[in-house]
Image (tube, rainbow, N blue to C red):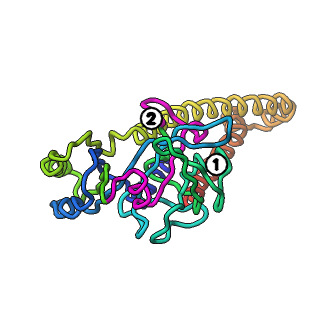
């Protein structure tokens, strides 16, 4: 259980998961330069997110989210892990990256075409990569709706392309931030509010309040409870099985036990002899299990 938690935390750390996110009305992109000067800001990225439709075939289309990210460099906040294909090349336009849940659900791969419906207009994009994002380790299509990728898809587009499609040249509607000292995050958020209030803040969300993050923590808690239950169940079965095996062994060797008693062996010594079988199994199982728990997760 601890290994699973560490694995998720490692992904958050390596991909620079945002400590907080600001959703706001369309705002000049240049505001990022001013916000970057705030004390305690480690990294900051401006982007655009917009709800879209995704055309699958003539009988099916699903809801989705388009995320416009800077294609001239890898994001310093909420980076993506390229699982196949590649990241954007500077100045690419009709290219996209697909979040891996959605890509897996419909079998999309590098070089395929995908049709997005943005404000009622169909636009074709070529898939250049399939990626994993720290924001979508669990994909939430609604307040309490978890999607496997079949009913909801996330698509990453070059920021400049999405700005052009939405007539939002040099504008953004979302800011993601990592901080140097999480203990000072409330002060940092207050400073952001002071600067961004004139543009119209929709909401500010801390990492721990993100729906996907909450869902993941609920899953981890549930896995922890189930792991304890299964461990207890397996231990109980092992105890019963060991007892039945020893009982059969003792019944089959009653003659030998009688001979040992006539030879002067005490009852305590005979009992210890048979219990040593269970002790040996327990010790070897513990050593083997400990070895696997230490070394296998590292691989």
Mark 1: give few (<14), some (14-19) or many (20+) Cα within 10 Å.
some
Say whether residue 280 is left or right of residue 227: right
Quarter placement of the C terminus: bottom right
Which mark is drawn over residue 135? none
Q: CA distance from mark 2 to mark 1?
A: 24 Å
Task: Point out residue 270 in the picture as x, y percentages from the top left corner.
Answer: 72, 36
Q: Earlier in the sequence, mark 2 or mark 1?
A: 1
Secondary element under disc 1, as helix, strand or loop, is helix
Q: Nearer the viewer, residue 119 or 20?
A: 119
At horizontal 66% and vertical 57% (from top left) the residue drawn is 112
Q: Nearer the viewer, residue 230 or 102?
A: 102
Q: Residue at x 31, y 49 (%)?
A: 173
Query: Which of 77/203 is in front?
Result: 203
Q: Which residue is mark 2?
A: 218
- Which of the 4 image quadrants contains residue 202? top left
Rendered location of residue 277, percent (x, y): 71, 42
> Against 185, is 271 above or below?
above
Q: Residues within 10 Å of mark 2 (few under 14, many from 20)?
A: few
In this rendering, would 239 be left or right of 78?
A: right
Q: Position of residue 233 (x, y in %)?
A: 62, 30
- Residue at mark 1: 104
* Residue at image point 52% right, 41% down: 53
Between disc 2 and disc 1, the foreground one is 1
Asked if the stretch drawn in magenta spans residue 151, the answer is yes
- At 33% across and 39% down in the image, what residue appears? 209
Residue 218 position, x and y percent, is 44, 35
Q: On the picture, is 251 further left or further right than 64?
A: right
Q: Nearer the viewer, residue 46 or 26?
A: 26
Q: Magenta residues, as a range?
A: 141-169
């Amino acid at each position: 259980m601890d290994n699973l938690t560490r694995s998720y935390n490692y992904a958050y750390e390596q991909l620079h998961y945002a400590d907080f996110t600001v959703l706001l009305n369309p705002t000049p992109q240049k505001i990022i330069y001013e916000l970057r000067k705030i004390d305690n800001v480690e990294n900051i990225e401006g982007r655009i997110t917009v709800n879209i439709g995704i055309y699958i075939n003539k009988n099916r289309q699903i809801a989705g989210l388009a995320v416009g990210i800077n294609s001239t460099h890898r994001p310093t906040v909420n980076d993506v892990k390229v699982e196949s294909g590649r990241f954007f090349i500077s100045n690419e336009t009709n290219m996209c990256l697909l979040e891996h849940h959605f890509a897996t659900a419909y079998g999309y791969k590098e070089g395929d075409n995908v049709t997005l419906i943005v404000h009622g207009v169909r636009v074709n994009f070529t898939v250049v990569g399939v990626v994993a994002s720290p924001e979508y380790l669990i994909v939430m299509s609604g307040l309490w709706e978890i999607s496997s990728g079949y009913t909801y898809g996330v698509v990453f587009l070059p920021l400049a392309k999405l700005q052009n499609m939405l007539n939002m040249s040099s504008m953004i509607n979302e800011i993601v931030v990592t901080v140097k000292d999480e203990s000072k995050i409330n002060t940092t958020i207050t400073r952001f509010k002071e600067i961004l209030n004139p543009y119209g803040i929709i909401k500010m969300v801390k990492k721990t309040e993100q729906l996907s993050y909450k869902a993941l923590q609920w899953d981890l808690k549930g896995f922890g409870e189930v792991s304890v239950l299964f461990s207890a169940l397996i231990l109980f079965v092992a105890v019963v099985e060991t007892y039945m095996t020893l009982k059969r062994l003792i019944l089959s060797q009653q003659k030998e036990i009688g001979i040992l008693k006539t030879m002067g062996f005490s009852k305590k010594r005979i009992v210890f002899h048979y219990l040593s079988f269970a002790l040996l199994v327990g010790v070897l199982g513990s050593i083997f299990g400990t070895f696997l728990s230490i070394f296998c997760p590292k691989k």
